[in-house]
Amino acid sequence: RDFCSCLGFVLNDRWTVVVSVSVMAFVLGGGVGFGRSVGGPAKSQFVGARVSAGKVHGLTARWNMADVLIVNAPSGGHAFIGYHLADQLVAKGHEVSIYNAGEEEKATKKNPCASYGDLTEKGVSVAYGDPTSEEVGADITKAFGKKFSVIIENFSKSAEEISPMVKHATETGVAQFLYVSSCGIYKKSDEVPLQVGDPVNEKAGQVAVEKLLESSGLNYSSFRPIYIVGPKAAKSDYLDYFFHRIVRKRPVLLPGSGDQMTSVTHVGDVASMLVDAVGNENASKEIFNVVSPRYPYRTFY
């Protein structure tokens, strides 16, 4: 996809030209807060830097020791969430294992898997396999030799893909099941901001996943991030365009007037919200939009 579609731009025949370096500071340093949409409109404030772990609005963190399994994607826009999630969970004292989709030899050629050595040095266990296999339960048991109290699923995009993991979680008595969904499931609307409870595209695979989890009997939560930035990304082509122009002091093009609203969230903040949900009864059977405040595109420049 071109850089515009990746950032949610709607292209037309009018462009705004701006010159800036502030976007680089935003992407590298963060710059987000959280809006908790369950029970009311999302409310948050732009704080200019990443929020501290444990300060997510609407969730009071409870750092109960847990044995956590992260089911992670080998590539794509969500893949690096798993890396930062594992890093933060270990820092809080949890036992962490990563079951990464794909083949190790291929996956470790690029981030985030190429950086898993940083995590294994901190005690994180890593194994590779197929989360969609009907034998995934046996594979996980063989790889790690234990049961998990919490599973965080950051791979599946359809009910068919996640069904074997849901079955494994049910059979092993997992206490909590967290799923990383997507804000992309909402129907297009001129009324913003979109909130949990707004119409969704019933054809979206993540919608079917959330319905499956709701009927599964598991103690689940679903998290819907939008545009994510930060280190260890598996894909960066949609950001490279901007950096290539910024470092060369060339104008950056924005579609239209640049007044379209968007939200960009640091991956560390996405991870911290999931970490805050581990062992937290306030997160039980809830859906969260994991986003920063809304600002026009031109604000980032």
Image (cartoon, helix red, strand yellow):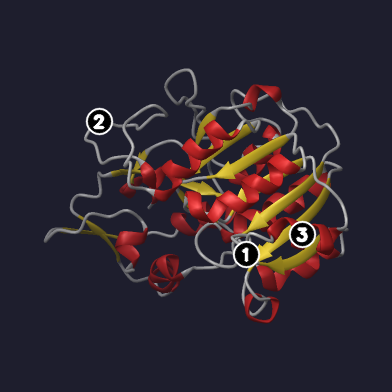
Residue displayed at 74% across by 41% down: 150
> Dividing the image into 4 quarters, which one contains the N terminus?
bottom left
Which residue type does callout 1 highlight? Lys
Residue displayed at 76% across by 37% down: 173
Q: Quadrant of residue 9?
A: bottom left
* Left or right, residue 125 beside residue 131: right
Crowd rating for badge 3 (residues with CA inside 10 Å; few <14, some 14–19, many 20+): few
Q: How far from the left and from the top, in percent, is residue 210? A: 49, 38
Q: Is residue 19 visible?
A: no
Crowd rating for badge 1 (residues with CA inside 10 Å; few <14, some 14–19, many 20+): some
Residue at the farthest left position:
13
Which residue type does callout 2 highlight? Glu
* Element carrying mark 1: loop
Q: Which residue is identified by label 1?
A: 232
Q: Is residue 141 visible?
A: yes
* Element carrying mark 2: loop
Residue displayed at 34% across by 31% down: 193
Q: Which residue is identified by label 2?
A: 191
* Element carrying mark 3: helix
Which residue type does callout 3 highlight? Ala
Badge count = 3
Q: Which residue is identified by label 3?
A: 138
The answer to which of marks 1 and 3 sits earlier in the sequence is 3
Residue displayed at 25% across by 30% down: 191
Q: Nearer the viewer, residue 130 or 225?
A: 130
From what the image shows, is residue 36 above or below residue 30?
above
Q: How far from the left and from the top, in percent, is residue 171? A: 73, 42
Circle on res. 149: none
Separation of marks 1 and 2 at Cα, in angstroms: 34 Å
Q: How far from the left and from the top, in percent, is residue 54? A: 71, 32
The answer to which of marks 1 and 2 sits earlier in the sequence is 2
